[in-house]
Image (cartoon, helix red, strand yellow):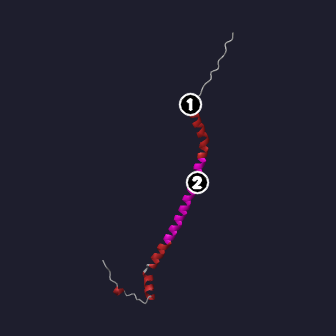
């Protein structure tokens, strides 16, 4: 008589099914997540560069306006405007306050 070989049937438990399902989900979702995050990072980098460009432009405008203020506040310009208004510059009438 021959002995019959019995094949063992291995049942997968609920916890193992959950672990395998989770691993499969990660395997599928991870590439999509990576691509999405890289696209988001790229978009943010473009926005940062645009803001930096705007800052540089505003700094140039501020520097130009500062130079113009200094030019308009010079003594020569004040005397010129005073003469146009019919006023004269008399150094003896100027008093220093200390």
Q: Position of residue 36 (x, y in %)?
A: 59, 49
Name which quarter of the figure residue 2 lies in. top right
Marks 2 and 1 in Cβ contact (< 8 Å): no
Cα distance, mark 2 to mark 1? 41 Å
Q: Residue at x 57, y 52 (%)?
A: 40
Q: What residue is shown with label 2?
A: 42
Say left or right for 58 vs 94: right
Viewer-nearest of discs 2 and 1? 1
Secondary structure at numbered mark 1? helix
Residue furthest right as drawn: 1
Report the label total.
2
Q: What residue is shown with label 1?
A: 14
Q: Was residue 52 drawn as part of the magenta stretch in this picture?
A: yes
Residue 93 or 7: which is nearer the viewer? Answer: 7
Say left or right for 63 vs 39: left
Asked if 11 appears above or below 62 in the picture, the reply is above
Q: Residue at x 51, y 70 (%)?
A: 61
Residue 35 or 8: which is nearer the viewer? Answer: 8
Asked if 95 appears above or below 63 in the picture, the reply is below
The secondary structure making up most of the magenta span is helix
Q: Was residue 14 drawn as part of the magenta stretch in this picture?
A: no
- Over which residues does the magenta segment extend? 34-63
Q: Position of residue 19 (x, y in %)?
A: 56, 34
Asked if 95 appears above or below 58 in the picture, the reply is below
Mark 2 crowd level (few <14, some 14–19, many ≥20, 10 Å Cα): few
Q: Position of residue 92 (x, y in %)?
A: 34, 87
Secondary structure at numbered mark 2? helix
Residue 75 or 22: which is nearer the viewer? Answer: 22
Q: Residue at x 46, y 76 (%)?
A: 69
């Amino acid at each position: 008589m021959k002995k019959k070989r019995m094949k063992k049937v291995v049942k997968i438990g609920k916890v193992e099914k959950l672990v395998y399902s989770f691993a499969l989900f990660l395997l599928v979702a991870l590439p999509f997540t990576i691509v999405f995050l890289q696209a988001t990072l790229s978009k943010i980098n473009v926005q940062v560069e645009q803001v930096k460009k705007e800052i540089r432009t505003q700094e140039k405008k501020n520097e130009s306006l500062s130079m113009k203020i200094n030019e308009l506040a010079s003594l020569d310009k004040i005397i010129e405007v005073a003469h146009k208004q019919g006023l004269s510059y008399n150094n003896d009438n100027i008093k220093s306050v200390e």
